[in-house]
Image: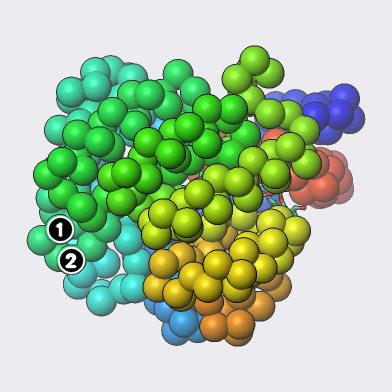
Amino acid sequence: MSLFHNLLVKAVQVMPTKAVWFFSKNYIAGNTLTDAVNKVKELNSKGILATLDVLGESINNEEEAVAAKIEALKVLDAIHENKLNANLSIKPTQMGLSINEDFAYKQILELVHKAKQINNFVRIDMEDSPYTDLTINVYKKIFQEYKNVGIVLQAYLKRTYDDAVILNKLSTNYRLCKGIYVEPAAISYKDKQTIRKNYLKVLKTILKNGNYVGIATHDKYLIDESYQIIKEMNIPKDKFEFQMLLGVREDLRDKINNDGYRIRIYVPYGKDWYAYSIRRLQENPNIAGHIVKEFFSFR
Ligand code: FDA
């Protein structure tokens, strides 16, 4: 991250939440589940799939984690009742992983069980590296009982290829992304080209093994390369999908959709939008600059 970029992100962090909301509203469906359902309906009407995420993470007490699980159960109900073409994404620390592994396992198990009853699917997001092993453990335990669950791998982590080799043996359903957290250089790649190279290496091993993968990126280079790999390896359309975040690169989203590939949009909603927004800002300095400008022009 450049010094200028750093300063911009810091400037945004000290701004009133209202100002950050100006930017956030593009990335978030709204405060309520109804907002999220309406957004998914809009996407579905264009033939685009969704995954719903209740915003929130790093919960440190069981009561809050249980409340987060209850909200996620409501999401599954809403998907079913509204016949949405969508599934559920959850953050393990929101389900209590930083409190206790077994507690989080039971919470996520309940969600996967419910999803199974309505023929749906739960994606376990991947958070920062202190949780990588714990998340994989929880996933593996749940997978012993239910197959409608999947995990996320991050191409910036040096360990990821080895993780994929192991997880491939379980017929794992993956989301593959670059990774969004700030990780120590000892365990992560920092250079854009190296991350891209690792992304494609991991993607190939997943596809070669016949596993399902959500190719989660807005990087045109990676999308073009993925198209090429899919063609060369003759991968059937029902073995992969593309995935993007709400409000990002809608031009590419529509292109993928028009090209006849499956595309799923990550639709976050809820009151805890601040941490999510700051992470999006850290990714994109142009937007941070825009928001700073907008904020000052309002005063
Ligand atoms: P890159 O960051 O290079 O972006 C490519 C281009 O996309 C940029 O040049 C810009 O044009 C545009 N772009 C990217 N981000 C933007 C933004 N915020 N606003 C506007 N434009 C933007 N990470 C993680 O660690 N764990 C997880 O579980 C997930 N889950 C997840 C789900 C889905 C569906 C997606 C798409 C992404 C994630 N991520 C994630 C985030 C992911 O790791 C990564 O940080 C972002 O996708 C950005 O990386 P790109 O591959 O898009 O490339």
Q: Is residue 68 left or right of residue 297?
A: left
Say if 110 sits above or below 183 in the image. Answer: below
Q: Residues within 10 Å of mark 2 (few under 14, many from 20)?
A: few
Instruction: Find disc 2 in the rendering and name its residue.
Output: 119
Where does the image place residue 289, in percent across and percent down from the top left? 84, 43
Task: Count residues near mark 1 (Cα–Cα under 10 Å), then give few for <14, some for 14-19, many for 20+.
Answer: some
Q: Is residue 58 above or below residue 85?
A: above
Q: Which residue is drawn at 19% across and 62% down?
A: 77
Find out whether the residues at labels 1 and 2 contact each other: C-beta distance under 8 Å.
yes
Residue 252 x, y percent position in the rendering = 68, 70
Placement of the C terminus among the 4 image quadrants: top right
Q: Taking 215 as reference, is 296 above or below it?
A: above
Residue ID at (36%, 40%): 167
- For the point 28% across and 18% down, the residue is 99
Query: Residue type at mark 1?
Result: Lys
Q: Label 1: which residue?
A: 116
Determine the secondary structure under disc 2: loop
